Image (cartoon, grey):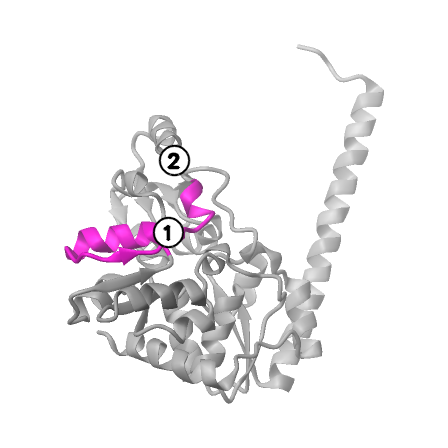
């Protein structure tokens, strides 16, 4: 074994000292940001909603953490005057639609959703014209314009119940083909499925899962239905983000391979600090979710911008599809 020289040891010591100082400086900055955030929340009468895929530093300061369904409910119920939505743009739109008299802001307006961009109004209208008797079911991961063309929305947590609630011979499903395939299998209903997908979940392959199972043979594989059908078929448990969290928390198993976005690691570790979680690939990271950070969160409350705006006519139509979703039990 090669021993470090005196100079090498000195360089290593300096490097470690600098690293420690940088970490301490960042923690001090974050402490100051958290204090400023609490002050601003009181001044603005604001509530912070954060999706489970956000950075840890965002989830730590959120008033509520949740998936799209839970956060949509919170937005509709809150008494706060300002909603700070830490997620992606379509989530902020849903909050504004359900709480039209509230001010809704997001930390970074660049936080979009590629899946939501895969479906467009003209294409959906054309499909509706081809199937005039069909009911349109839209995954909540979609723009307000698409929701306005929709009969009822759904999330991954209630998609099966929404489909089962419909009395329709034809169903148009947009925009996630992977979730659509899963729901179609679970319900036995034939659906006309749009060819959209989540860039992050769709990246997970059978090869990735096989390799992880070989590495962790005692671990259970929990997977989100936005993943490819052949990957979902390998799951020991398949469910929405919230369902995965609850399953891992309540399961007797102590080791899991996780097939969903890595931001869920915060809640998984918080719920079950004694359990081990291995994400199925290092690429299960949504860059759009991660564009938000603590500094931007404070800044958006200071400036009360960027604000979410939905045209009234679009909001009125979109609200019907969201409210119908919330009524499904």
133 up-or-down from 293: above or below: below
Query: Residue at label 1?
Result: 195
In front of the other: 324 or 48: 324
* Residue in the picture at 49% in, 79% down: 96
Q: Is 189 on the left-hand or right-hand side of 109?
A: left
In what element is the residue under mark 1? loop
Q: Residue furthest right?
A: 7
For label 2, the SS is: loop
Quadrant in which the N terminus appears = top right
Query: What range of the chain is rendered magenta?
Result: 176-203
Mark 1, Cα crowd under 10 Å, few <14 / some 14-19 / many 20+, is some
The x, y position of residue 113, in whole percent, is 51, 58
Rendered residue at 54%/57% (across/down): 289
Alpha carbon separation for disc pair 1 and 2 = 18 Å
| Residue 191, horizontal then vertical, whole percent | 23, 58
Residue 117, placed above or below residue 299? above
**Label number found at residue 272:** none
Q: Which residue is labeled 2 in the image? A: 205
Which quadrant of the structure image shows residue 213?
top left
Q: Position of residue 128 (x, y in %)?
A: 31, 67
In front here: 321 or 206?
321
Residue drawn at x 74%, y 36% is 16
User: Is residue 195 something one can see in this rendering?
Assistant: yes
* Between discs 1 and 2, the one toward the N terminus: 1
């Amino acid at each position: 074994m090669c021993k470090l020289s005196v100079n090498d040891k000195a360089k290593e010591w300096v490097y470690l000292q600098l690293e420690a100082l940088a970490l301490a400086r960042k923690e001090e900055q974050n402490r100051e940001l958290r204090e400023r955030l609490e002050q601003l929340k009181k001044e603005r009468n604001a509530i912070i909603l954060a999706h489970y895929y956000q950075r840890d530093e965002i989830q730590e300061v959120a008033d509520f953490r949740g998936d799209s369904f839970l956060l949509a409910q919170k937005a509709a119920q809150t008494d706060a005057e300002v909603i700070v939505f830490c997620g992606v743009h379509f989530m902020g739109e849903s909050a504004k639609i359900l709480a039209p008299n509230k001010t809704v802001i997001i930390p970074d307006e660049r936080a979009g959703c590629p899946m939501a961009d895969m479906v467009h109004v003209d294409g959906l209208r054309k499909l509706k014209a081809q199937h005039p008797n069909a009911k349109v079911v839209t995954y909540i991961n979609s723009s307000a314009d698409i929701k306005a063309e929709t009969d009822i929305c759904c999330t991954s947590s209630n998609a099966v119940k929404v489909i089962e609630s419909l009395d329709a011979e034809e169903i148009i499903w947009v925009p996630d083909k992977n979730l659509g395939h899963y729901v179609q299998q679970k319900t036995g209903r034939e659906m006309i499925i749009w060819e959209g997908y989540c860039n992050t979940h769709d990246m997970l392959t059978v090869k990735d899962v096989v390799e992880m199972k070989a590495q962790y043979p005692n671990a259970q594989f929990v997977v989100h239905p936005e993943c490819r059908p052949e990957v979902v078929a390998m799951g020991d448990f398949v469910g929405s983000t919230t369902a995965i969290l609850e399953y891992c928390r309540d399961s007797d198993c102590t080791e899991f391979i996780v097939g969903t976005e890595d931001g869920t690691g915060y809640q998984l570790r918080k719920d079950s600090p004694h359990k081990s979680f291995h994400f199925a690939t290092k690429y299960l990271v949504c860059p759009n979710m991660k564009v938000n950070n603590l500094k931007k969160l404070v800044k958006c409350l200071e400036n009360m911008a960027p604000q979410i705006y939905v045209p009234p006519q679009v909001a009125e139509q979109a609200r019907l599809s969201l409210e119908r979703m919330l009524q499904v039990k």
